[in-house]
Image: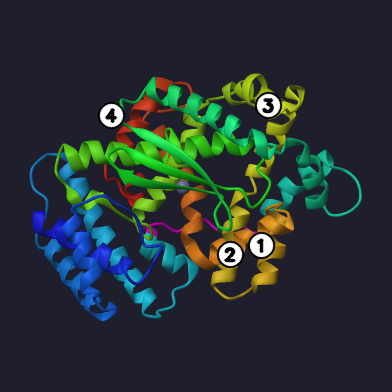
Amino acid sequence: MARISREYVRLALAIGQHDKDYVDAYYGPEDLRKEAESAKLTLETIGRSVSQLSEWIEGAPATGNDELTHLRHQYLEKQIAAMGARVRMLNGERLSFDEESKALYDAVAPTYPEAHFQEVLDRLVKRFPGSGSLVERYDAWRRAFVIPRDRLDTVFQAAIGACRERTLAHVTLPSTEHFTVEYVTNKSWSGYNWYQGGFRSLIQVNTDLPIYIDRAIDLACHEGYPGHHVYNALLEQHLVKDRGWIEFTVYPLFSPQSLIAEGTANYGIEVAFPGHERVEFERTKLFPLAGLDPARAADYYEVMALVDQLSYAGNEAARRYIDGTIDREAATAWLERYALMPHDRAAQRVRFFDQYRSYVINYNYGKDLARKYIESRGGTADHPDRRWREFETLLSSPRLPSGLR
Ligand SMILES: [Zn+2]
């Protein structure tokens, strides 16, 4: 297995030479990084080596009773298969949206018709009566909840502090873990966690578009605690340091691992702030820090809960756009109408589709799969301690998306 995991790292880094988004994080042996940079393997050579690696892993079945060892084996099989699919895509192979998400993320998200979203939109129309399009009325109302630029860092630091405190009350993290925030522009995403190894993360927040108050907790939880930063730190501690499994020092973005990463990062928000605790914290802490009216916090989150039910509309737009049944303009218009995104945000989202394609399902479908899995193991909202325990176990193990169902 040592040979297989080293080869896996070598090939992931080699693909990274052709695809700048592929290697999301790497903190393994430096000689492998240098080798990838100097060898500059062709996609053809990489493709052949990935096929060979698939044969190696199939020929080395896991033995014994250790659950993690079996999970590791299944995980590597699927990760290597996804690697092969990504190489074929880089070589020009076209997959449909669902074929691609199956090949890369080990999952196919459910499809919903327009009527599904229209029901939610009808409720929002009642909440925002008047003339003009619904998205315009919603956008105008929402402007009162933008965090002023000069208060952004104060609000974010307060959100990060609270998410961290709540996470550390349940999850044991290495004492040296550390997390830095940077503000950037001109990106297709709104936030990003760059894990650097050694239990350190760099979080970048994109300030191209107005940042609403709900992004503070969302980003702090998703990118930080108990999301990506915690996930990466737990994998590094339990799988890399404790077990010496170096394949976990590389994180190939277009792989099943991303569904687990994004799904748990999103689900972690309600784990850290169950029930009314979120609104309570926003009303008493974040709204005052942002200079917003605390009396409007409950109303704001009622509307956001409704808008959240439109999340799969983003998948529909992406599916049609990637499958070529609608063009850029139509995808933007779809997002404005069914996902209630103002024009600029919808256009930014379509640029995200260009860059990340079926990756979009990892956020909402990943979250739903993570929640169902943890609830099926007794980690329900009524049993918060159990829920944290199951959450931590999931973050510390190489479980696959198909293993959540
Ligand atoms: Zn993420």
* Residue occupying the far front of the picture: 150
The residue beneath circle 3 is 287
- Answer whether residue 112 is magenta in the image: yes
Query: What is the crowding at mark 4: few (fewer than 14 residues within 10 Å), some, or many (at least 20)?
Result: some
The residue beneath circle 2 is 351
Q: Quadrant of residue 52?
A: bottom left
Give me the disc on residue 347: 1
Work out whether mark 3 precedes mark 1 in sequence or the reverse, and give the earlier one. Answer: 3
Q: What residue is rendered at 72% in x and 33% in y?
A: 300
Q: What residue is rendered at 67% in x and 40% in y?
A: 149
Q: What residue is rendered at 65% in x and 74% in y?
A: 327
Scheme of colours in the image:
rainbow
* Residue occupying the far right of the picture: 131
Q: In which quarter of the image is residue 332?
A: bottom right
Give me the disc on residue 237: none
Is ligand 1 less than 8 Å from the beta carbon at label 2? no
* Whole-number angstrom distance, CA of label 1 to CA of label 2: 6 Å
Q: Which part of the image, by quadrant, shows the N terminus? A: bottom left
**Three-letter residue code for mark 3:** Phe
Task: Confirm or deny contact between disc 3 and disc 2 (CB under 8 A).
Answer: no
Can residue 221 be seen from the camera position used here?
yes
* Whole-number angstrom distance, CA of label 3 to CA of label 1: 29 Å
Q: Is the magenta stretch mostly helix, strand or loop?
A: loop
151 horizontally vs 161: left or right: right
**Stretch of the chain drawn in magenta:** 105-113
At mark 2, the secondary structure is helix
* Whole-number angstrom distance, CA of label 3 to CA of label 2: 31 Å
The residue beneath circle 4 is 174
